[in-house]
Image (cartoon, rainbow, N blue to C red):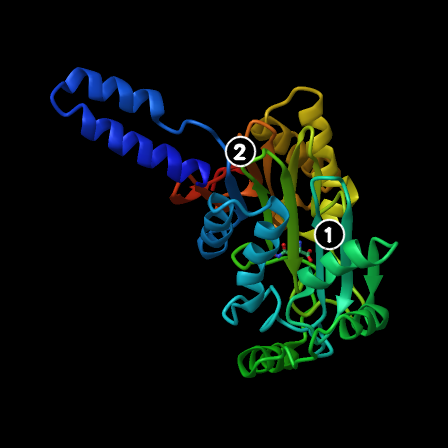
Amino acid sequence: MQRRKFIERSAISLAGISLGSGLISTNLFAMTKNTSTKPVAVATWNFQNATKLAGAMLEDGASALDAVEKGVMVEESNLKNTTVGDGGAPDRDGNVTLDACIMSPDGNAGSVVYLKEIAHPVSVARKVMEETPHVMLAGEGALQFAIQQGFKRKNLLTEESEKAWKEWLEHKQYKPIINIENHDTIGMLCMDENGDIAGACTTSGLSYKMNGRVGDSPIIGAGLFLDNEIGGAVGTGMGEAIMKSVGSFLIVELMRQGKNPQEACKEAVLRTIKQNANFRDFQVAYVAMNKKGEIGSYCIHKGFSYAKFHNGESTNNPSDSYLKD
Ligand code: SD4
């Protein structure tokens, strides 16, 4: 029987057997309560549908890698999410181009950038990791590879996103600044029953970006990094700032040096603030998990939160921020 269910059922039956003695039953229940931090799933923003799915899979014994892939796919399929997967906002020329990456506990990684017409770029990234000698495939080559692997082409520009893009075209204001109210990139970290960590990150990037622009999300070390001996980190927000500080790699290295996930995320954000005089104009946010299953997060602007699923409970957790209002 799967471990958590076993613990719950044992606790219930033990409590039942000892009904005659309140004291004994309480003690037995306390002894059998599951206090382990594993398994656990966390994701950027309030993507609880994604963490619930991944968390339920983990509790049923799935590997961190399978759970993290399926978890982020929830948002890739969500047409209301206009910065991930199907329904993602196009670039300024009307092309929907997707970036995604995945990392497994053994340190292997796969990534796709500027991928068109494929609704689940994270799964193509996993195929790159598992079926090729490479880490990253781009554009037309990534699309050809996906088709060879059996993925189906699909028009990802929905009526709504086309309409919004056409409205944007009327003013054509291109500001390489993220509206801090409009972040939807999903980065997720999962720790399975064995304590192994996997991560994934997937996005359509900045809305109305320049054609050819690639952000941090598919860059190993920027939007995602993990070391199964230490922990993992994922980022969201202004990709350019995250890339310039190799934020997720930095956080994992800071955890290696002894910082907890919260301290490490804060240090990475402080570096970005130091590096960018215009830091008030954009958001950068990180979530990190260490090998103990402890979670931390930090961001520039108030308003970021992370979703977590642990021990049957789904929560949305507001992050501490540098700017308080
Ligand atoms: C990017 N980091 O492409 C992504 C954008 C993002 O929520 O996080 N949006 O720069």
Amino acid type at mark 1: Asp
The alpha-carbon separation of the residues under discs 2 and 1 comes to 21 Å
In the picture, the disc for residue 52 is: none
Q: Nearer the viewer, residue 176 or 45?
A: 45
Quadrant of the picture in which ligand 1 is shown: bottom right
Q: Residue shown at 67%/73% (left/top)?
A: 90
Looking at the image, how many numbered discs can be counted on the residues? 2
- Residue shown at 60% from the left, 36% from the top: 288
- Structural crowding at the residue carrying mark 2, measured as other residues with C-alpha within 10 Å and reported as few (<14), some (14–19) or many (≥20): many
Which residue is at the far right?
133
> Mark 1 near ligand 1 (CB under 8 Å)?
yes
Residue 76: quadrant of the picture = bottom right
Image quarter for residue 9? top left
How many C-alpha atoms fall within 10 Å of the one at disc 1: few (<14), some, or many (≥20)? Answer: many
Q: Which residue occupies 73% across, 34% down?
A: 250
In the rendered image, the vertical position of residue 278 relative to residue 249, given as above or below = below
In the image shown, does 306 or 167 lie closer to the viewer? 306
Query: How far across and down, in percent of the image, does residue 119 sit?
Result: 64, 71
Residue 313, image x and y in percent? 38, 43
Depth check, front residue: 180 or 66: 66
**x%, y% of residue 294?**
53, 30
Q: Which residue is mark 2?
A: 295
287 versus 52 height, above or below: above
The answer to which of 17 and 270 lies nearer the viewer is 17
Q: Residue furthest left?
A: 20
Q: Earlier in the sequence, mark 2 or mark 1?
A: 1
Residue of label 1: 216
Quarter of the image that includes the N terminus: top left
Secondary element under disc 1, as helix, strand or loop, is loop
Point out residue 266 in the picture as x, y percentages from the top left corner. 61, 31
